[in-house]
Image (cartoon, rainbow, N blue to C red):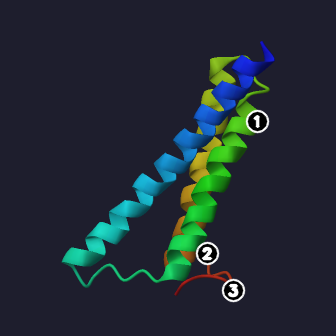
């Protein structure tokens, strides 16, 4: 039984890493076709950490929840926080010192 749990855990880790890589491919490909998208290595690293952290946080917390409604609410909260932090880093919607504006 314990071995089966480890396989599921490894699959989830692989899914999170692949999902992050696919999302990061979007700006990488866009940079090849337009000058409007201008990401530096630091941008990719920060967003990669943000996406991986969000995915791993969801997996860690959702594994302790039984109800699908709780998991859905957790996903909604984490995705909302992810987008707010991403927007703050990109354009500074809150005007914090670490904003990208």
In the image, 78: left or right of 37? right
Q: Which residue is mark 3?
A: 97
Residue 75 lies in quadrant: top right
Q: Earlier in the sequence, mark 3 or mark 1?
A: 1
Residue 88 point in image, percent of width and height: 57, 72
Q: Which circle marks residue 94 in the picture?
A: 2
Residue at 51 percent across and 72 percent down: it is: 44
- In the rendered image, the residue lying farthest to the left is 33
Alpha-carbon distance for marks 3 and 2?
Answer: 9 Å
**Category of crowding for the residue at label 3, using alpha-carbon neighbours closer than 10 angstroms: few (below 14), some (14–19), many (at least 20):** few
> Do the residues under discs 2 and 1 have CB atoms within 8 angstroms?
no
Residue 77 point in image, percent of width and height: 64, 44
Residue at 56 percent across and 63 percent down: it is: 48
- In the rendered image, the residue lying farthest to the front is 3
Alpha-carbon distance for marks 3 and 1?
Answer: 30 Å
Q: Which residue is mark 1?
A: 61
Which dot, 3 or 1, sits closer to the camera?
1
Residue at 60 percent across and 82 percent down: it is: 99
On the rendered image, what quadrant is the N terminus found in?
top right
Residue at 42 percent across and 80 percent down: it is: 39
Does dot 1 land on a helix, a strand or a loop?
helix
Q: Earlier in the sequence, mark 2 or mark 1?
A: 1
Q: Is residue 21 above or below residue 2?
A: below
Residue 94 point in image, percent of width and height: 61, 75
Q: Nearer the viewer, residue 2 or 52?
A: 2
């Amino acid at each position: 039984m314990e071995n089966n749990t480890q396989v599921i855990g490894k699959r989830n880790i692989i899914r999170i890493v692949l999902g992050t890589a696919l999302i990061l491919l979007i700006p990488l490909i866009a940079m090849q076709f337009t000058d409007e998208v201008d990401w530096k290595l630091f941008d990719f690293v920060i967003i990669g950490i943000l996406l991986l952290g969000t995915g791993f946080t969801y997996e860690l917390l959702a594994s302790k929840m039984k109800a699908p409604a709780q998991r859905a609410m957790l996903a909604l909260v984490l995705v909302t926080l992810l987008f707010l932090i991403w927007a703050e880093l990109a354009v500074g919607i809150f005007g914090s010192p670490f904003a990208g504006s």
